[in-house]
Amino acid sequence: MLAKLFYPVENPLFNYEFCKGYYPRIADNKMHGRVARLLVNPLLTAMEKTIGKSDYIDFMKSFKYPLAGEFSFRRNILPELRISSDWGIEIAILSEMQRNYSSNNICQVELADNYDHKHQILSIKDSSKGLSKMSIDIIKTLVRKLATQGYSFSKETFRSIKATYYRSALDLIDIYRSDAQMNGLKFDSHNEEKTVELFALNIMKAGESFFENPMDTPFIPTWHRVKSAIPDFLDRFKESVKADNKEFK
């Protein structure tokens, strides 16, 4: 997996600055990856229908699995990279790539035929954890990124996005049901629809959060800012790592 992930940015004959990994989310004879399948994909479609065509949305839709946490990039990208501190991290990193680099410098690669990824609980009754919190963080990240590009969001916009999303997601469930049947996988239509209903509700929760705190900055400071504020930070960090290693040997 590492070889495939690093090869595109390490090969001197290639011109890639960033590589995004992806792989099938199938385990226990059923489909996983609910947030990507049932939230991100139909939400991007809903946003496109509601606010119009966007280079940013086209870019995000081009990734086979935008939430995959496996990626590699050249070292020169790191100092100015703004990394989100919540579950929107993968979306935020892709957004930074879209903002700062040409699509010709970005690629994606399949890392494995199958990979049993960590699975989160849905957490229907508690939006502070599980897939419920993850979905809210991701929605807010997408909205903020579009807002920085000049798109305006009102309460009516969020209602339209929610309604459009819900219909698009239900259509996808029908497609996934057929896909599961063709490949001999178990498929629970009831749980899939419960998940979509939760995500639709969380679109409105994310909208409320956006209106309550539109200036919220969920990013970890860039390395350039850290070094500016604490010039000897890297030396101190290195010494701390050495001390930890010595303590736990």
Image (cartoon, rainbow, N blue to C red):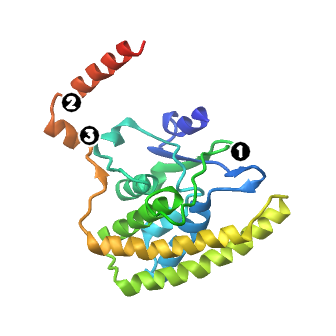
In the rendered image, the vertical position of residue 225 relative to residue 199, given as above or below: above
Q: Which residue is mark 1?
A: 114
Question: Looking at the picture, which amino acid does disc 3 mark?
Answer: Trp
- Say the numbered circle drawn on residue 41: none
How packed is label 2: few (under 14 Cα within 10 Å), some, or many (20 or more)?
Answer: some
Q: The C terminus appears in which quarter of the rendering?
A: top left
Please report whichever mark, 2 or 1, sits nearer to the chain's N-terminal start: 1
Q: Mark 1 to mark 3: distance in Å?
A: 35 Å
Residue 223's label in the rendered image is 3
Image position of 132 with respect to 169: above or below: above
Q: Residues within 10 Å of mark 3 (few under 14, many from 20)?
A: some
Q: Earlier in the sequence, mark 3 or mark 2?
A: 3
Q: Pointer 2: what residue? A: 233
The amino acid sitting under disc 2 is Phe
Front position among marks 3 and 2 = 2
> What whole-number distance in Å separates the C-alpha atoms at marks 3 and 2?
10 Å
Where residue 229 appears, as percent x and y from the top left, is 14, 39
